[in-house]
Image (cartoon, rainbow, N blue to C red):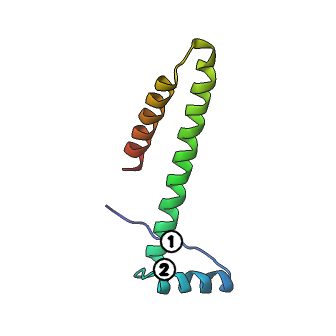
């Protein structure tokens, strides 16, 4: 895997808060913390998108006599799809 350097400007107060978290939560450095934070945000975004897709699907199926079992199966399929996207 190749990495690319980016430049990031942060206010002093914000950077001090990051440094405190890096120290208290035993991250190796700022970069590791920022990568973890970005991954977490990406996972949240993917989950939100999947939940919106499921909501639309559920809404379109309400008039098709969809059972609770059908909805649960679709929810599980959506979560499996999300897990694959995260990996």
Question: Helix, strand, or loop for circle 1?
Answer: helix
Question: Helix, strand, or loop for circle 2?
Answer: helix
What residue sits 66% from the left and 86% below the top? 12
| x and y percentages locating residue 38 in the rendered image | 51, 63
Tell me the crowding category of disc 1: few under 14, some 14 to 19, or many 20 or more residues within 10 angstroms, Cα based: some
| x and y percentages locating residue 51 in the rendered image | 56, 39
Report the front residue among 84 and 8: 84
User: Which residue is outermost to the front?
Assistant: 68
Question: Which disc is residue 26 wearing?
Answer: none
What residue sits 49% from the left and 82% below the top? 22
Question: Gap in Å between the C-alphas at discs 2 and 1?
Answer: 6 Å
- Residue 82 against residue 26 in the figure, above or below: above
Q: Quadrant of residue 8?
A: bottom right
User: Which residue is outermost to the top?
Assistant: 64
User: Seen in the image, is 38 located left or right of residue 26?
Assistant: right
What residue sits 48% from the left and 74% below the top? 33
Instruction: Say whether marks 2 and 1 touch (CB < 8 Å).
Output: yes
Q: In which quarter of the image is the N terminus?
A: bottom left
Tell me the residue that label 2 is attached to.
Answer: 30
Report the front residue among 67 and 11: 67
User: Seen in the image, is 66 located left or right of residue 83?
Assistant: right
- Residue 52 against residue 10 in the figure, above or below: above
What residue sits 38% from the left and 66% below the top? 3
Tell me the residue that label 1 is attached to.
Answer: 34
User: Seen in the image, is 2 located left or right of residue 50?
Assistant: left
Report the front residue among 63 and 6: 63
């Amino acid at each position: 895997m190749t990495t690319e350097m980016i430049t990031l400007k942060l206010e002093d107060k914000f950077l001090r808060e990051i440094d405190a978290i890096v120290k208290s939560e035993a991250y190796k450095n700022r970069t590791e913390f920022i990568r973890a934070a970005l991954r977490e945000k990406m996972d949240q975004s993917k989950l939100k998108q999947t939940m919106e897709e499921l909501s639309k699907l559920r809404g379109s199926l309400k008039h098709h006599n969809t059972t609770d079992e059908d909805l649960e199966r679709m929810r599980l399929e959506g979560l499996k799809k999300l897990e694959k996207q995260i990996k």
